[in-house]
């Protein structure tokens, strides 16, 4: 369906077909509102040398005058991690964020020396008007405090995005506003965009209150040094661990920058309440009796640079594992990380540690996201006419649509889309529209400019196939070869053991050059002929496709 002038368009630049880089857009006439600007962590070998992935912001840049603000649902990296990159790419005047997210964003931007951005804090009573769109908020329960869902009242109908949520009737932080959600639903929701992360998990997500008992048990039963690794982003978990340390008279040593940051910000905001003397520097803390030490660190997913990996490898600056240390993994493994976690567990066990991996602490049932039962509850509260599952890989989106069908949303009213696909809301009806540009932009270290898909393709290709350089010296004036071509390979074959292959390649390069030089070629033609003949020869011999780089040196004969 073609977009008409008065339609409201809804599309995602990131967050569909993936868990990460959430960036959703609501567009009406001259107004675009962006909901969240997240990153995705690359963290696997398919993207060599890459730290983050961000969305391509080109569409927003091309329509920069329409962009009226960025609304942040909560302070997790998959929702705020892309802000610095967004600000470098285009002009953004205002960010609207709840208190904790606002503190985290300020800290993040200050580190990148970005100071010229206005952050307006909102809460569940705030209402903003952006031309014809009215925006209001409702509180959610998630693994971080200050998480919100957003309601958009547009001239074409009401759109609700849940943000990340779960329903927890005995939460550690605030209760979600269930009555308010029911009222929003009663007033009529045309399109619901809902968190799909745990849509394949049946039942209800376990309450964080039940987790607290399990943490206390571990503290009660541990006689020696205790090391707990968890996500810094799970603020409620971090909070509970710190409270247990206080209760069981252990001092806390914090390792890992993201953990230090979140504890700082959460203590300043009053979310984590702890005495100053509870936290000690490693040089003092590590000299305490072993049963008075808690080490709280990052790296529960086996991230190679995080504190726990360094401790396991024996390469940590301050601490080595000693026999009878207890190491607890307090977060469920993200699929794909199982191998590296396993590797770390083995190393810790070898060094004599008692490793606790199987407890409710790392069960998927204690996640910060709604399982199927809670997803049904959300759908029943909102009773949307149309359903748009977001925040999930393709199979999660699909499972979520199936759950919606069970509570009465016909499958033709559910939209399983890809990043860039546009939905059109027109007088309370939703249609499929065209597409806006979307792509992955890869961020390598601190290089904010981003790398395109092509550079990554080259890296993967290099990693899998290696490189062969062919150097030819020619006398371009007389179209003659000056010397025998040289062949250098890296990561392709070991040259010393493949002298025959290398000299055959040299011969072929020589023949190719002699043939082509007769036709008075330009450099481009020479390069193409070398690439073609040597590429297909090496493929025949090795079944591999190395990157072939012809280097031509023009050298007149003496
Ligand atoms: Zn989250
Ligand atoms: Zn998220």
Image (tube, rainbow, N blue to C red):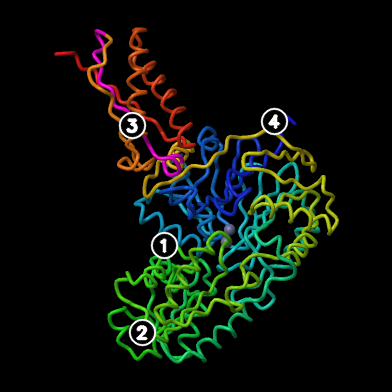
Quarter holding ligand 1: bottom right
Frontmost of labels 1 and 3 is 3
Q: Which type of secondary structure does the marked residue at label 1 adopt?
A: loop
Q: Which type of secondary structure does the marked residue at label 3 adopt?
A: strand
Mark found first going from the N terminus, 1 or 3: 1
- The question of residue 473 being in magenta is answered with yes
Frontmost of labels 3 and 2 is 3
Marks 4 and 1 in Cβ contact (< 8 Å): no
Q: Is residue 509 left or right of residue 63?
A: left
Marks 2 and 1 in Cβ contact (< 8 Å): no
The crowd level at tag 2 (other Cα within 10 Å; few <14, some 14-19, many 20+) is few
Q: Is residue 182 left or right of residue 440?
A: right
Label at residue 277: 2
The residue at which mark 4 appears reads as 5
Label at residue 304: 1
Label at residue 469: 3
Residue 531 lies in quadrant: top left
Furthest toward the left, the residue is 558
The magenta-colored residue range is 461-478
Marks 2 and 4 in Cβ contact (< 8 Å): no
């Amino acid at each position: 369906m073609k977009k008409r002038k008065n339609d409201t368009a809804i599309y995602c630049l990131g967050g569909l077909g993936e868990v990460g880089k959430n960036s959703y857009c609501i567009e009406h006439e001259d107004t675009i509102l962006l909901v969240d600007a997240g990153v995705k962590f690359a963290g696997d070998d398919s993207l060599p040398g890459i730290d983050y992935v961000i969305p391509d912001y080109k569409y927003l840049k091309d329509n920069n005058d329409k962009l009226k603000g960025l609304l942040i649902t909560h302070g997790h990296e998959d929702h705020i991690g892309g802000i610095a990159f967004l600000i470098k790419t285009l002009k953004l005047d205002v960010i609207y964020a709840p208190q904790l997210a606002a503190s985290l964003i300020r800290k993040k931007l200050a580190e990148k020396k970005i100071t010229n951005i206005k952050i307006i804090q909102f809460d569940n009573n705030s209402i903003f008007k952006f031309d014809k769109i009215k925006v209001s908020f409702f509180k959610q329960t998630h693994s971080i405090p200050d998480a919100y869902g957003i309601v958009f009242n547009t001239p074409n109908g009401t759109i609700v995005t849940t943000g990340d949520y779960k329903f927890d009737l005995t939460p550690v932080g605030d209760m979600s506003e269930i009555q308010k959600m029911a009222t929003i639903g009663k007033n009529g929701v045309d399109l619901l965009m809902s968190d799909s992360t745990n849509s394949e998990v049946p039942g209800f997500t376990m309450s964080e209150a039940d987790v607290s008992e399990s943490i206390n048990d571990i503290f009660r039963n541990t006689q020696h040094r205790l090391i707990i690794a968890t996500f810094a982003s799970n603020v409620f978990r971090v909070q509970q661990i710190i409270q247990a340390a206080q209760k069981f008279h252990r001092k806390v040593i914090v390792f890992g920058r993201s953990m230090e940051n979140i504890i700082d910000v959460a203590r300043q905001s009053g979310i984590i309440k702890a005495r100053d003397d509870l936290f000690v520097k490693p040089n003092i803390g590590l000299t305490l009796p072993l049963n008075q030490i808690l080490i709280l660190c990052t790296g529960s997913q086996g991230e190679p640079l995080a504190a726990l990996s360094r401790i396991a490898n024996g390469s940590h600056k301050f601490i080595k594992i000693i026999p009878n240390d207890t190491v607890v993994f307090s977060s469920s493994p993200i699929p794909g990380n199982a191998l590296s976690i396993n590797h770390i567990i083995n190393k810790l066990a070898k060094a004599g540690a008692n490793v606790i991996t199987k407890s409710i602490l790392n069960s998927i049932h204690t996640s910060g996201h709604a399982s199927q039962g809670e997803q049904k509850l959300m759908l029943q509260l909102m009773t949307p006419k149309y359903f748009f599952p977001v925040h999930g890989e393709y199979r999660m989106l699909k499972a979520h649509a199936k759950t919606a069908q069970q509570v009465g949303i016909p499958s033709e009213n559910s939209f399983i889309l890809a990043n860039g696909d546009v939905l059109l809301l027109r007088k309370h009806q939703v249609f499929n529209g065209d597409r806006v540009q979307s792509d992955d932009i890869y961020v390598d270290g601190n290089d904010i400019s981003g790398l395109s898909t092509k550079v990554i393709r080259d890296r993967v290709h290099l990693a899998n196939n290696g490189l062969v350089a062919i150097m030819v010296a020619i006398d371009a004036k007389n179209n003659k070869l000056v010397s025998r071509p040289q062949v250098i390979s890296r990561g392709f074959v070991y040259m010393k053991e493949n002298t025959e292959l290398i000299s055959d390649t040299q011969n072929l390069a020589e023949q190719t050059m002699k043939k082509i030089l007769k036709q008075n070629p330009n450099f481009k033609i020479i390069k193409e002929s070398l690439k073609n003949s040597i590429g297909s020869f090496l493929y025949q011999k090795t079944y591999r496709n190395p990157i072939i780089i012809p280097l031509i040196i023009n050298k007149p004969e003496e």
